[in-house]
Amino acid sequence: MIATILRATARHRRTILAAGVVVAVVDAAAAALVPYGGQRLIPVLAVVGVLLSLGLASWLQRRPAMFVAQPDVPAFDGPVRAGPVYLALCVLLLAAEAVGKLLRSVGTSAALDSLLPAISMLFFAALFVVATWRGLGVQLRPEGVRVREVWGTLTVPWEALPVGQTHRPADQPTRLRLVCARPELVRRRGRVAKETLPTDNIDAQFLADVIRYYVLHPERRGAIGTEVEHRRLQDALGDQQR
């Protein structure tokens, strides 16, 4: 049952995030109107606890050895995981409580003390919701490898990667080390790691194999993102493993 919930959350993440924003606005209004008390926080903390538990269950799942074809981009995308959705919803609820407390304290001496926490939580909530809405993780494009994280993006052109030297880990690390022969070609926006790729939503060994394949076969890069190339890639990697 939990696996079904996680899959549904990942599949409908944008609808769930939009609903979460609406609920957060209503919760902020309720927090502003209802006198502060521990009993009112119990349902909110219970929901946060459930969301964190589901997020933990998502991160404990085995990472899939697959990409999803996105012809409109075009790109091969790592599968969407439910964990970031639950984390974004938690931050949204906490931001709603902080905003409600600020609104409740307007006109009192406590307003100034509530201002900074409310602004900070709103910033983090917006950051997590936007990042989760757009998608996180590794994305392969015809021009190179793109990493999308909450704090920024990293783009590594195929030409920056040395032929045949992609590190294939022996286990499943949370980040895959990436060796760059031409680091001057790498482009960064925001705060992201320069030489590692996140693998919390994809099998690390599979990711290393796919990157190595396109480093060695530049003639196939232009087709990245198409369903035809996606099927051909699966067949090619299957033949290599046999």
Image (cartoon, grey):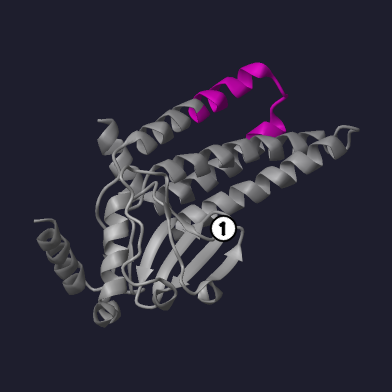
Q: Within the magenta stretch, is there residue 42? A: yes
In the rendered image, is residue 70 in sight? yes
**Quarter location, residue 229:** bottom left
Lateral position of residue 212 relative to residue 42, left or right: left
Depth check, front residue: 81 or 229: 229
Name the spot of residue 119 as percent of width and height, x first: 73, 47
Q: Residues within 10 Å of mark 1 (few under 14, many from 20)?
A: some
Q: Residue furthest right?
A: 109
Depth check, front residue: 233 or 67: 233
Depth check, front residue: 209 or 202: 209
Tell me the element at label 1.
loop
Lateral position of residue 153 relative to residue 96, left or right: left
Please state the extent of the stretch shown in magenta in the rendering: 30-48
> Majority secondary structure of the magenta segment?
helix
Q: Quadrant of the N terminus?
A: top left
The structure residue drawn at horizontal position 51% and vertical position 65%, both measured from the top left corner, is 154
**Residue under numbered circle 1:** 192
Q: Quadrant of the C terminus?
A: bottom left
In the rendered image, is residue 71 in sight? no
